[in-house]
Image: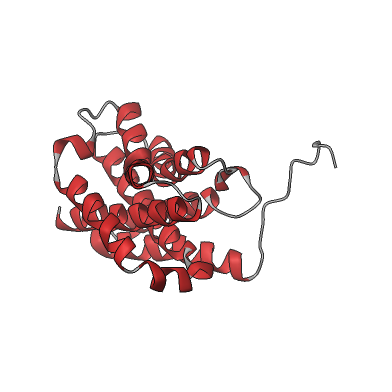
Amino acid sequence: MIAIDVIDIVGTFVFALSGVMVAVEHKFDFFGTIILAFVTAVGGGTLRDILIGATPVSWMGSEVLIYVILVTIPLAYLFLNFLKKLRRTMFIFDTIGIGMFTILGLEKSLEIGLSPIIAVMMGVVSAVFGGVIRDVLSNEVPLIFRKEIYAFACFFGALVYLIMEYFYPIKELNMFVSILVVIAIRVLSIKNKWSIPFNPISRK
């Protein structure tokens, strides 16, 4: 499906860009930057494919995604000064990525016959675990473990997609709307400082 391919390519680009910017911020060398861009872009999808038994994993079946990552890295360095000026809003790249990969992972899981509940879980895994690996390698607490609304936005967007598919099965439209829902929740949560409370039994 053309829509799926486009989502995969654009999502890979924005996640790779996110990885590059984190690598630059932490002063990684060029090789380290390549590694961080790569795991950010394909880490979640790789884990998803392993869990659902879709092997070889997606990026091994097509060199296009590798080329996308390798092109993104020099482009990010070329426009580095411009991107640094946008540093406060750089989270939008990560946000677009999680929106796209949520629906990509969800749809791929549904296509192989998994239940909607499992498909939603795989959508979230696909969206957030590239960022988890990125944050661990850069010695940061992953966003999924903080109070910020992150995985919840993916979960809610996936539910919206399932509901729309049930009542109004126009796949491309439903994908677009669901991705926008994920992005909107994430952006609004940052703007309005919405958060998920800490565990009430945790030490204050």
> Looking at the image, can residue 151 be seen?
yes
Residue 34 lies, in percent from the top left, at 32, 45
- The colour scheme used here is secondary structure
> Looking at the image, can residue 170 be seen?
no
Compared with residue 8, is residue 90 higher up or lower down, i.e. above or below?
Answer: below
Q: Residue shown at 40%/51% (left/top)?
A: 19
Q: Residue shown at 63%/47% (left/top)?
A: 146
Q: Residue shown at 56%/48% (left/top)?
A: 143
**Residue 75 quadrant:** bottom left
Judge left or right: residue 152 versus residue 103: right
Residue 175 lies, in percent from the top left, at 31, 59
Residue 157 lies, in percent from the top left, at 44, 56
Towards the viewer: 42 or 20? 20
Q: Residue furthest right?
A: 204
Dividing the image into 4 quarters, which one contains the C terminus? Answer: top right
Residue 68 lies, in percent from the top left, at 21, 53
Q: How many marks?
A: 0
**Residue 200 quadrant:** top right
**Residue 56 quadrant:** top left
